[in-house]
Image: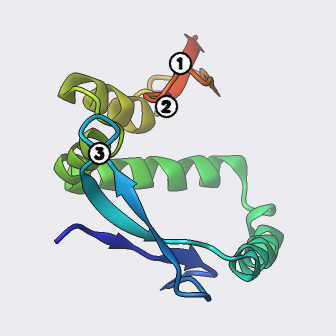
Amino acid sequence: MHPFTQLFIDGQWRPSSTNETFEIRNPQSNVVVGTCASASSQDCKDAVEAAARAFKTWEHVSLSDKRDIFIKAADILRDKYTDKVIAAIGEEIAVLPYMAHFNLSVSTVGLCPTDGTTTLSQRLPIGCCGSPQVLSTS
């Protein structure tokens, strides 16, 4: 059976308030690779309100602490979930493994500067395989 993804709102996983779902299909084969909760207008309002509440705390976190949080998240993603992420990317957007690895690498390794470097990135729409693009490092 393919995976079901609930909505993540206010720190909790939950189904759509209307219980509606939609299928996630591989664009190459049209095979169903997952099902996702379909957010209603109320779910969207709930998510925006939760984000506004969270921002009241997040906006006071220092940039270096925010960086550390994102680097830790990238480390966890890379160290524990690489195979699952690569498989999901391949199934959901029908890319070759090397492109799935590239997308994950940009998200986890490419945006974690080391040795005093600074990385600037910008997300650009480049088709169905879009990912953040590293513009420069210094």
Front residue (pair 57, 128): 128
Q: CA distance from mark 1 to mark 2?
A: 8 Å
Q: Residues within 10 Å of mark 1 (few under 14, many from 20)?
A: some
Is mark 1 in CB contact (under 8 Å) with mark 2? Answer: yes
- Give x and y (percent) for residue 38: 55, 72
**Any mark on residue 57, and which?**
none
- Mark drawn on residue 30: 3
Mark on residue 111?
Answer: 2
**Mark 1: amino acid:** Val
Residue denoted by label 1: 134
The vertical placement of 87 against 80, above or below, is above
116 or 30, which lies in front? 30
**In the image, residue 58 lies at what x, y percent?**
74, 65
Label 3 near label 1: C-beta < 8 Å?
A: no
Q: Residue furthest front?
A: 30
Locate residue 46, reporting x and y percent: 74, 81
Q: CA distance from mark 3 to mark 2?
A: 33 Å
